[in-house]
Image: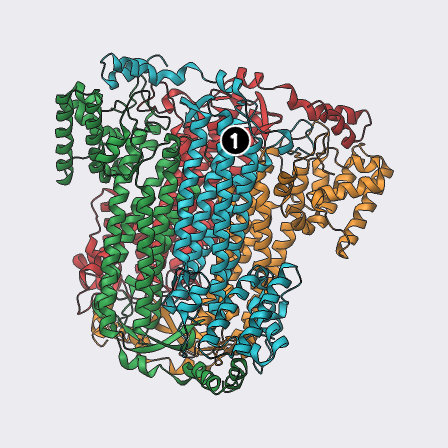
Chain colours: A cyan, B green, C orange, D red
Amino acid sequence: MKLWEKEYKLDRQIEDFTVSNDYILDQKLIKYDCIASIAHAKMLEKTGILKKGEAEDIIKELNSIISLEKKGRFKIQKEQEDCHTAIEAHLTKTLGDAGKKIHTARSRNDQVLVALRLYYKDELNGCKDNVGNLIRAISKFRKKYGATKLPGYTHTRKAMPSSISLWSDSFVDSMKDNIKLIDFTLDLIDQSPLGTAAGYGIPLDIDREYTAKLLGFKKVQQNPIYAQASRGKFESTILHSLTQIMFDLNKIASDLIIFSMPEFGYFELPQELCTGSSIMPQKKNPDVLELVRAKYHVVLSYEFQVKSMAANLISGYNHDIQLTKEPVMKGFDITKDCISIMAHVFENLKVNEGRCESALTEELYATEKAYDLVKKGIPFRDAYKTISKEY
Amino acid sequence: MKLWEKEYKLDRQIEDFTVSNDYILDQKLIKYDCIASIAHAKMLEKTGILKKGEAEDIIKELNSIISLEKKGRFKIQKEQEDCHTAIEAHLTKTLGDAGKKIHTARSRNDQVLVALRLYYKDELNGCKDNVGNLIRAISKFRKKYGATKLPGYTHTRKAMPSSISLWSDSFVDSMKDNIKLIDFTLDLIDQSPLGTAAGYGIPLDIDREYTAKLLGFKKVQQNPIYAQASRGKFESTILHSLTQIMFDLNKIASDLIIFSMPEFGYFELPQELCTGSSIMPQKKNPDVLELVRAKYHVVLSYEFQVKSMAANLISGYNHDIQLTKEPVMKGFDITKDCISIMAHVFENLKVNEGRCESALTEELYATEKAYDLVKKGIPFRDAYKTISKEY
Amino acid sequence: MKLWEKEYKLDRQIEDFTVSNDYILDQKLIKYDCIASIAHAKMLEKTGILKKGEAEDIIKELNSIISLEKKGRFKIQKEQEDCHTAIEAHLTKTLGDAGKKIHTARSRNDQVLVALRLYYKDELNGCKDNVGNLIRAISKFRKKYGATKLPGYTHTRKAMPSSISLWSDSFVDSMKDNIKLIDFTLDLIDQSPLGTAAGYGIPLDIDREYTAKLLGFKKVQQNPIYAQASRGKFESTILHSLTQIMFDLNKIASDLIIFSMPEFGYFELPQELCTGSSIMPQKKNPDVLELVRAKYHVVLSYEFQVKSMAANLISGYNHDIQLTKEPVMKGFDITKDCISIMAHVFENLKVNEGRCESALTEELYATEKAYDLVKKGIPFRDAYKTISKEY
Amino acid sequence: MKLWEKEYKLDRQIEDFTVSNDYILDQKLIKYDCIASIAHAKMLEKTGILKKGEAEDIIKELNSIISLEKKGRFKIQKEQEDCHTAIEAHLTKTLGDAGKKIHTARSRNDQVLVALRLYYKDELNGCKDNVGNLIRAISKFRKKYGATKLPGYTHTRKAMPSSISLWSDSFVDSMKDNIKLIDFTLDLIDQSPLGTAAGYGIPLDIDREYTAKLLGFKKVQQNPIYAQASRGKFESTILHSLTQIMFDLNKIASDLIIFSMPEFGYFELPQELCTGSSIMPQKKNPDVLELVRAKYHVVLSYEFQVKSMAANLISGYNHDIQLTKEPVMKGFDITKDCISIMAHVFENLKVNEGRCESALTEELYATEKAYDLVKKGIPFRDAYKTISKEY
């Protein structure tokens, strides 16, 4: 059964190719489609398209699907293509005609849009929570080691004295700006697409404000063509938000990989967090940090994928855009995992105060020496030249 | 003369390679560096590092550079590397010791950061203005032709009836969301980096709140390591904002290229906006639209450039990041140009109402026909199947 | 059990994070690791490190793993991390001390390298076969419809007369160049890395020429640091080869999507190859073509992922590089699928000769008209101007 | 004057936008267009379209343009759009009717294609020469310091002993593979597009084999649609070749930046190759290496730009593709510069043998110790476990 079932039979090879792994990815969306369908059913009842009893039956059945799925007992079949078909099929099987009515006044296109948007909102909030945990872990780490001084580097060369607190705070501040970006993204996408149908509205009187309110959206996304066009765009901004978080994790990882080398020893990663080599018995490797570093590029490539794929297309839904689902889903999974693991790293990370101190060599104070001359009234540029002769 | 001039002479090949085209790009930053240097001089006077007269002389000279540059008479020399060196050299030449003091309590690194940030704010506001103009041009176009109906497409196939107003509004709504994104970006970067020096602060008492206020920044970017780390990040968000605008222009161009084909004829681009072929006498080509479509990918590649280049680097300034300047500058130039040209296109674009009307063929109303059955009480899915047999 | 099992226990969260989905991806590599291990065992026997009986037992067991895996009965456990561990664990369990010797004179790093390289060679040859099938499908299509003339377009505007044969041949020629690129790639990577150990060779006498010969490699990749560094690079060239194929498929799809629109009707995609809409009963959508078009961007993003991820790393193995496995594997799967489905499309694609003919409107012959004047002795540029006045 | 000059006047804003910086970029192509035009003129004479005297005059004038351009005295005017127009305008001005005939049997499109292809061949050969020089510089460096041992790293942790010769050779071997890739690319693009006109051939008898031979092409690119379609594709493969070279330079730079840190001191970059800081008097920064590292990402973004921009377009020339010229030109310039500067770095780079030796700490020999046990008959895995307890 397909939502667009017709007299002819779809070519088997084409079916395999077009369904692809949608039916697997969509497991995550079942809950959100049910929630949206409940709101839709209420609206259909309100506007008289569904009878009261029909709406109640549908809503009961949709809630039962949510429960089933939670227990791992609602599986989308490949031949059903996606969650929307699986849910409608279930409703039709259990409720008969009432089930056949749920699709009134909507299109699979707006089902996809609304389910994804609900999912995105949940995931973005999940990311925010994780970033909050990370900030707490960094702050705890900073509390313990913040007073320790260590060299600050520019051009990968010792520059001026820095400290663990300065270093830690730089990431806290950056993560706080990332939260602002997530909040913006949440606000941007907080528009209900439900009721835009296939991108050109619906020849029926429906109450879009009502479903938007039921679903907790801040506003209705009025223009149906824009509802479609924002797919790809909203995903881009989401992925941009994720890459900004991942970018900071990439930098933390880059710092820790270098400065936990025994040659520096500023940081120490306990061996329980390190993996070994199959051939070299002595090795304790910071795999976790290398993977975090690398995963920035994975998420970045997803952002680029969406941005490249969605271009050069005319207005109105194009199937191309369906493929933006996977990179965003994976982007969320990877980013949330990486934030969590980095919080875990900070909870276990040690600072070797002795190594830090002994690394505070004399040349780090060259600028201070120049400023000592400045304080004696020598113009900075002359002071600079005087001191630079010592090096 | 270099800001870091020492006893030894830099290898010539290395000099050519490292200066590259910075001295050309930096022409755009002279004004902003002068503005920031004026604030810096005022602060140095306030904190007693500069005498009143010195500060006044410096400020006068900086204002004179701004005027000279406006008239095209302040050119950075290649051997000066960048605008910061050219400006300090000028001050030292005209003012002697006072000029040598201007660099007190700052680093070229925060000069770069603050000048760029002021430049970014101006450019983002410029983009906003251009988007405003475009929205007005679309709205005027919509006023003229909005009532015209034409086919709406999905999967590049006729789907349901649409209209010029629906189509126009989709871009207006999208552009309004783009403005929200620009506003967010403006807010995000509205942090004064001045006083963070080389990324580890300065061993002198300075008044960062004061310079921030003088320069119109909303707040001080407190952490100096984050000030450095935000380079690359802020540029990413700026370029993301630009690609979102360019994405919509890409879609407008894609629509117009296809639907102004004589085979459709819904839109008409006057011949004054079309170029010809060197060999085919009949051709009238929509080059302008093709270029706008393509330039999305140019700006997108700049975003990716910054995001790829800035990764896998440890904290603290790395010269790599200097190369983010060019893609952002070019991104602004291209985006502003493309928005303007698209406004110009809308001002000249015609809708062929006859062609639109005759394209409203019967199958566009198949959904309506199904809904007629729904209104008679037939469940939607059954109605759908009944009507689908006709096609 | 891990290959690097030590006294301490790896932190559980770190384990989950670092193993990730390697154990799933590696199912595809079991066969190749066994083949390489057989060659390695033979070499160890030849050089006296394994006794004859030991080698025979190991080889027998490795062949048995190959059979088991073929039947779906050799599954890597998550706690085993990867196929290499699963295989060594199996050998140790069944053979005791002999199993513990198989890892002599090699590292997991060169196991990975050699298994992947054997896998890549198989997959590249598989792609070549698929491209061959596609060329045959296009040629058959061309045989049937080649004589049909239709408009050739530039700038998405009618330009000069073209034909189905001209159009078909353009893709055949391009695909033939793609095969040259695959052949080059096959030649480039045809270097045995086995014996480079962890990237710095092995303090034992081994016979790398012998294993290379047994495994059918054209040559030994002598430098062990380069063996490691070529990971990421070889994957890049492989993915570049794949994107070149996908690029052509993207263009075929772009052509067919537009020119099978009923408004043109040059091509016809039978309805068995088209999917429908959940709301619009009349729709027959070319989803398959849209997906092929989109999947170019997926593979392209994988290429960029590898190229971005592998940069800014020092020499010697870094775990980052492990993540290049998934994008290449997926790149192969997608590319092979898309080539096959496109061959299937060509086998079913129809040309509507009537629509093609009636589209051959007069302006397509404007250039010919100019050349008629040229034949009468008028300089081309004058002829061009004369004719252009007619349009 | 434009090649497609008509009765109407192109809108000024559109003209500025569409010409863009083509007239500047095209300065590099003047020579190649002249060379191709000479071959074209000879062919027109051979086939009787030009009279002998006309052809001779044209050829003489084209040679004179080549000389003028060499001396910087042939400048393309903005209103001429590109080099092709400037050259035809010059011929028409100096020769009258003969000049008006040079465009017979060709289109600007194939002029662009053939000029670019000649330029690409020259540039690729230039890259090859530069890579040759770099290999020589590395080899000379290796000759001087090769015997020095230093630690080999994996996961940025000391792994096993390595040496300067092992390290140097890894890049020599990789660069040799890069040369193979350049040679393949040269071979791939060595197809004459001249005579394919606007992508659909020409309604005149022309001798394409003859011009191909005159221009030194290995073969004729027969299919005119493929000639157009290969634009974007050939550029992709060129840029892929360049990114492979840049990738190795990125790795060399990454190694040198880290291991010339005073904390390691394995390598020493003479101060003449280092730049300073505007604030910190002691600094000697490896800017040159950081820039090389960063420029990999610049070239990579150009590759992605071309690959993203050229997709989702129908067959036949689209103006989008014109924008591929700049990224390729810049890609060549950057890559050639970076190879040269890296050769210069190797000519000046020093190895600090004392620091290398003292870094050869005991744990680098752990694997050797395990193999000592293996030689005594202990299975490798048991030997590994025994030794690992020591660490």
Q: Position of residue D310 (x, y in %)?
A: 41, 58
Closer to the camera in the image, A142 or B279: A142
Q: Position of residue C96 (x, y in %)?
A: 84, 37
* Label 1 residue SS: helix
**Residue position marked by numbered label 1 in the rendering:** A256
Q: Position of residue A385 (x, y in %)?
A: 28, 16
Badge 1: few (under 14), some or many (20 or more) residues near its Cα, within 10 Å?
many
Is residue D131 at all visible to an observer of this figure? yes
Closer to the camera in the image, C175 or B124: B124
Please indicate whether residue C188 sits to the left or right of residue B136 in the image: right
x 12%, y 25%: residue: B57
Please indicate whether residue B196 sits to the left or right of residue A92 in the image: left
Q: Is residue D262 above or below residue B67?
A: above
* Quarter of the image with the N terminus of chain D in it: bottom left
* Quarter of the image with the C terminus of chain D in it: top right
Q: Is residue B11 above or below residue A226?
A: above
Q: Position of residue A320 (x, y in %)?
A: 48, 64
Q: How many numbered discs?
A: 1
Is residue D337 at all visible to an observer of this figure? no
Q: Is residue B276 above or below residue C372?
A: above
For this orientation, the residue located farthest to the front is A52
Amino acid type, mark 1:
Leu
- What chain does badge 1 belong to? A
For this orientation, the residue located farthest to the right is C53
